[in-house]
Structures are given as C-alpha cells and as structure tokens.
Amino acid sequence: MGIRMWGETDVRRARAVVLVAATAGLLTRMIIAANSPGPADVRIFEGFAKAITGYGPVRIYAHPLPGLPVYNHPPLAGWMLLGLDRLTELGFSFATLIRVPASAADFACAVLVFEIVRRRATPRTAMLCGTGVAVSPVLIATSGYHGNTDAVAVAFALAAAHLLADRKAPLAAGVAAALSISVKFIPVVVIPALLVAALRGGRPVLGRFAAGLAGVTALVWGPALLTVPLDLVHNVLEYAGGSYRLWGLVRFADVLGAPEPVIAFVQGGGHFLFVLVCVAAGARLAWLRPAEAPGVVAATLGLLLLLSTASGLQYLTWAAAGMFVLGPVEGFAYSAVVGLVAVLGYSGRSAVRWSEPVLYLGAAGWFVLAVGLFTGVRRILATPPDAAPTERAAISAPRTEFRSCSTVD
C-alpha cells in the first residue's frame, strides 16, 4: 500500500525537476565563467584561437606555435575556436566564451542521463541521476571554471548510445559518434562498442550507423587529412597526454618506486595497451548487452579514466556523467569524492600541481571509480540479454509499477 505507481505525469514532473536543476547548474557555471579567469588552459585556448584565425582550422596543425603547447585537438574543435574568436570581435570575453560549450554540454547531459535512466529504472531514480549531473561539483568545476572540450565529447558519445539503443535512430547515432571524436579524440575508445551494438541490431542498423559515422567523419576530418595528414596524425592521433604523475596507475607506480624506464614506457608508447584494454572491454560488453549501449559507453569511458596514464583535472569529466548512467550511488559517490579533488585542485597554486591532501583524495577517488565501475558493469550483465530498456525497468520495479513503467517510453 505504500508503493506508488509511476505514470506519465510522474515522468513529466521528474523531467521538469531535472530541467530546473540543469538550468540552475548552467547559470552557476556561467556565473563562474564570467567572474573567474580560469586556469592556464583558458589563455592557451585563446592563443590557439588567434592562431587558427591566422592560419585556418586546417593548416593550424602544420605551423609551429611559439609560446603554446602542441595543438592536439581534432578539426571540429578548431572550427569552434574560430567561431569563438569571431565572437570576441563583438565585444564578448573569450575567457567566458570558452566555458560556454562545456557548460551547455552539461545541461544536455543532465537531460540525456535522465532519459537514459528512466527507461531502465523508476522516474525517481532517473530524476536523481539527471539532477546529480546538473549539480555535480566535478562538472561544475571542469566546465564552469576550466572550460575544456571533454564534456562536449562525452555528451555526444552518450547521445550516440542513447540514439542507437533507445531511440532506434542509428543514422543520427553515427552522426553523434562522429561529432564526439571530432571535438576531442578521447571517445574513440567507445566507437568499436557502438559498432558492435549496431551490428547486433542487424545489417540495416549497422549500415545506417556506419553511414552517419563515416559521412560526418569524412566531412570534418577529410580536409585536414588531405592537406596536412602527417601533422594531424602526430598532433592528435599520437598524442599521449602530459607527463604529470598525479592520478591513477602512474601515481601509484611513482609512490611505490617503480623504475623510471617503466613509468616512461607506460606514459609513452605503452599507454596504447591500456587503450586497447578499454576498447576490448567495451566491445565485449556491447556484444553481450547491446541494448545497454549507454551503460557500455559510460563504463568504457570510466575504464579509460581508471587506466589513464595521463593526469589532468579536466580528465575527471570522462566518468562524471557516465557514473550516473551506471547508478545513482555510483554517480553521487564519484561526484562527491572526485568533485572535492577538482575543487581543491583548481583552488591550489596550479591545476597541474596538486597538494598532498588532493593527491590522497585523488587516490581515494580512483578506488571509488573502480568500485563504481565494478558494480555498474555487474548490474549491466545482470540484465536479461533480450530485455529492452523499458522491460528492464519493469523487471527491476515492484509488480505494481510494471504496467505504468512499460507504457512510458
């Protein structure tokens, strides 16, 4: 008698709560963006934008950039920076503008996570997860203060999985997947999993997904591949990340006194081995549970962060939204611990010089991530192989919720 049935009205109310939270989260991020200088990356991105305005978003890869690091961003990011630089001519601050795409992506991710989770759990759980993304301190810090493109790439990757598994729109899913790797190359680890999920849907689904993926990839990457192929490969595809030892396996190896050649190898060419592990794990999980593609993408991106040999506060974004896809407990636990890492890290002397407390919190966050991935993947594998997302929600809900859950899609 205490169990309440969930109907369409409840879904609409839950969605409205998420929209309000996402709007408040977006405003919070933009207030931070408008009133803070941000880390060094803000100035670096502004330098990139000026260089792109001079050389163009294609030939930028072939030009040395004195005073700036290697330009390691995919072609779509270049067009974005060009557009932002044009907007500064109208009087807008670049330091504020560079935080807009990631902040908007977080808004989209909050709604997206709600739509993904409500098909697999009750609207109340979906509301918690969507709201969690909106107020996540990890995302507020990395998007509102840092302003890198990681959140945008993650949003497109999760959208691709949602479109493929839940919306039955493989062509649009392929487009979203291509956009995800065109703004930042990190989500390339989920492309094989998405292809496997599409394959499990049948040849027509795979064909449409591949058409969207190949078409947009050719459109965005084609000009640079034809004009400056070697520079593009060197700057973007072969980029191994920074050499800082602040997070995860490299941090633990350093603390435990691993030989320098070993650490150098892991951070150099050896990091591709960890990438292959992520690709293989995601593809296998997608083969076993293709209907759970959003969870597979979330788990694969989380595993990439877990095994990452590079360190950066913005990298913590990779798992932030996805952990809520895996479960509310996993999402809130990760956001609480790792959010503290991000907030304290950005409050320190430098985003790449973590204090001892932040390093310890980072180690704790790594273990929280590991446990969350374990429980999340176990939950995915516990789903019946042939169960559609709405059927999964019905199976996991009390019997009195079955009928109403099964009618809400």
Image: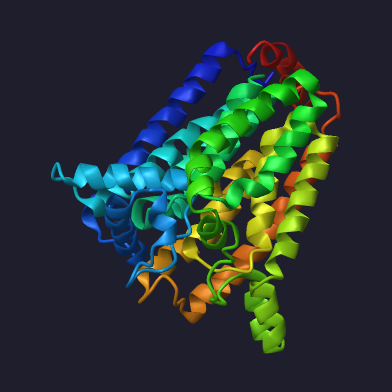
The picture places residue 381, in percent across and down from the top left corner, at: 83, 39
State which quarter of the image contains the N terminus: top right
As drawn, 255 above or below 37: below
Q: Residue, x 60% and y 44% (percent of image)? A: 322
Q: Residue, x 75% and y 18% (percent of image)? A: 204
Q: Residue, x 37% and y 43% (percent of image)? A: 79
Which of these two is toward me, 330 or 352? 352
As drawn, 295 above or below 291: below
- Please indicate, yes or no, whether residue 76 appears anywhere in the rendered image: yes
Q: Of all residues shown, which one is farthest toward the left?
A: 91
State which quarter of the image contains the C terminus: top right
Which of these two is toward me, 181 or 117? 181
User: Does residue 255 appear to the left or right of 59 in the view shown?
Assistant: right
- Please indicate, yes or no, whether residue 154 appears anywhere in the rendered image: no
The picture places residue 374, in percent across and down from the top left corner, at: 76, 52
Q: How is the image coloured?
A: rainbow
